[in-house]
Amino acid sequence: MKILGCADGPASFNDEMNRRGIRVVSCDPIYRFSRKQLSTRIDQACEEIIEQTRKNAGNFVWSSIGSIEDLRDTRTAAMAQFMADYDEGKEQGRYVNAELPVLPFDDGAFDIALCSHFLFLYSNRLSLEFHRESVRQLCRIAKDVRIFPLIDLDLRPSPYVQPMVQSLEKNGFTVSIERVPYEFQRGGNEMLRIMGKTQQRRHHRC
């Protein structure tokens, strides 16, 4: 199983999967920075995120994460884990400096491509065309593409989801909107799943 994490940022996902023996390549433009440069940026960003979350606490579901303090601790631990893995991960090719809508990977290089908290979330900043090009790129390199969540920063359903679904289905992809067992941003508990044309034929034979 080969997995791509797109726009992964300073997260512990890659390290956790690597410890389980699952190969994940994470790509993000922040990986052009050194460990020292990232450390400063992460500290600043974490405080900004915590402050914004505190101001808008009603926009979040405090179940899996119980409080602002829990959020701070969870983020701090995840970022520390990322930083401890970063240099070794870059040497092993697990952290790649790349960004949508153009990715430097071969056609069909991955079984699954994941994109979390980037596409659709920033619908007010990134155009529909950007989303189309980005999804086209993810479908080029992976058989199974999963994008989460499907709301924008104002917690509204992204206006780009339905046009993307219609376009993908018109081009022969199998597309579904699936409920997931995680919700932190209120209403953000669905993902878009796209199965490529080759995968679609295999699914039908089963």
Image (spheres, grey):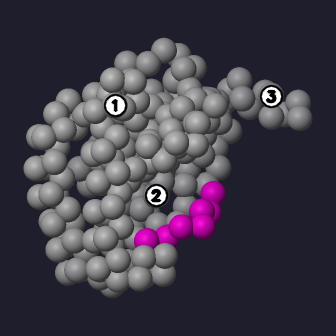
Q: Which residues are magenta?
A: 178-184
Q: Earlier in the sequence, mark 3 or mark 1?
A: 1
Q: Which residue is mark 2?
A: 149
Label 1 close to label 2 by CB (< 8 Å): no
Q: Residues within 10 Å of mark 1 (few under 14, many from 20)?
A: few
Vertical position of residue 56 compared to residue 146: above or below: below
Q: Earlier in the sequence, mark 1 or mark 2?
A: 1
Residue occupying image coordinates x 55% and y 61%: 190
Pair 1/2: label in front: 1
Which amino acid type is shown beneath numbered disc 1? Glu
Q: Give the distance between the C-alpha atoms of the residues marked 3 and 1, in whole angstroms.
A: 37 Å
Dividing the picture into quadrants, the one containing residue 167 is: top right
Which disc, if any, is residue 118?
A: none
Mark 3 = which residue?
Answer: 202
Mark yes or no: residue 128 visible.
Answer: no
Q: Secondary structure at mark 2?
A: loop
Of 65 and 143, the residue lying toward us: 65
Residue at 48% across / 53% down in the picture?
A: 148
Label 1 to label 2: alpha-carbon separation: 30 Å
Most foreground residue, 195 or 133: 195
Callouts 2 and 3 close, C-beta under 8 Å: no
Mark 2 neighbour class, 10 Å CA radius: few under 14, some 14 to 19, many 20 or more: many
Q: Is residue 39 above or below residue 112?
A: below
Three-letter amino acid code of the residue under disc 3: Arg
Q: Residue at x 80, y 34 (%)?
A: 203
Q: Quick one: quadrant of the N terminus?
A: top right
Residue to which mark 1 is pinned? 88
Q: Is residue 157 magenta?
A: no
